[in-house]
């Protein structure tokens, strides 16, 4: 379940050596996702490649659209290999449903990831976070903080962190129970 409002989602193109990098964007704001009793966070500055979709479906599933925010979560989980490929893919499908991706498109994405997602899962993609001016974040403490969010933290710990409390939406008691909180 998304814990941040869709209206706060934004990204910008990645500019490298004065050129716009093909198929790579930079997340602009925190994105929080709740699953299995934990909170997962996508940091601002994460570089990712938008929608993961099979090549045969490019005409039907646009790169830009309702799959963008779920793709940020999915790409983060893949690059850090969080909880295994199957779990990461399931979170992506749940996120797509939460953002209104139709069931037929979600089904196509599921088939594509099941058949071809292993190439991305086992790739040597690097965890890259950039700051202002597209300068790469290299501070090991900051990188570890981002990785900690990516691997999930308890709601009690999340509620003590300003990046969470400043960005999360108010949840109903039913939503908190659904998340296992």
Image: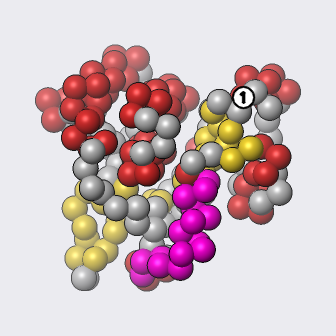
For the C terminus, which image quadrant?
top right
Eyeballing the image, is 140 above or below 95? Answer: below
Label 1 residue SS = helix
Neighbour class for label 1 at 10 Å: few (<14), some, many (≥20)? some
Return the residue nearer the eye: 113 or 85: 85
Task: Tell me, yes or no, if residue 40 can be seen here.
Answer: yes
Residue numbers of the magenta segment: 135-149
Q: Quadrant of residue 103?
A: top left
Eyeballing the image, is 159 above or below 177? Answer: below
Q: Is residue 108 magenta?
A: no
Q: Position of residue 89 (x, y in %)?
A: 41, 31
**Residue sitting at x 45%, y 68%:** 129
Q: Which residue is mark 1?
A: 179
Eyeballing the image, is 165 above or below 141? Answer: above
Task: Tell me, yes or no, if residue 108 can be seen here.
Answer: no
**Residue sitting at x 24%, y 82%:** 17
Q: In the picture provided, is 149 more to the left or to the right than 130?
A: right
For the N terminus, which image quadrant?
top right
Q: Is residue 141 magenta?
A: yes
The majority secondary structure of the magenta stretch comes to helix
């Amino acid at each position: 379940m998304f814990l941040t409002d869709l209206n706060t989602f934004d990204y910008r193109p990645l500019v490298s050596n004065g050129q716009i990098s093909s198929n790579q964007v930079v997340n602009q704001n925190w994105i929080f996702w709740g699953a299995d009793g934990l909170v997962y966070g996508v940091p601002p500055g994460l570089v990712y490649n938008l929608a993961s979709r099979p090549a045969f479906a490019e005409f039907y599933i646009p790169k830009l659209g309702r799959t963008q925010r779920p793709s940020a979560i999915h790409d983060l989980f893949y690059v850090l290999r969080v909880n295994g490929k199957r779990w990461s893919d399931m979170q992506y499908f749940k996120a797509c449903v939460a953002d209104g991706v139709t069931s037929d498109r979600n089904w196509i994405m599921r088939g594509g990831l099941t058949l071809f997602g292993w190439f991305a899962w086992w790739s040597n993609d690097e965890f890259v976070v950039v700051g202002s001016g597209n300068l790469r974040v290299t501070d090991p403490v900051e990188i570890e903080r981002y990785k900690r969010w990516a691997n999930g933290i308890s709601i009690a710990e999340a509620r003590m962190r300003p990046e969470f409390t400043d960005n999360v939406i108010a949840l109903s008691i039913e939503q908190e129970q659904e998340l296992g909180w």
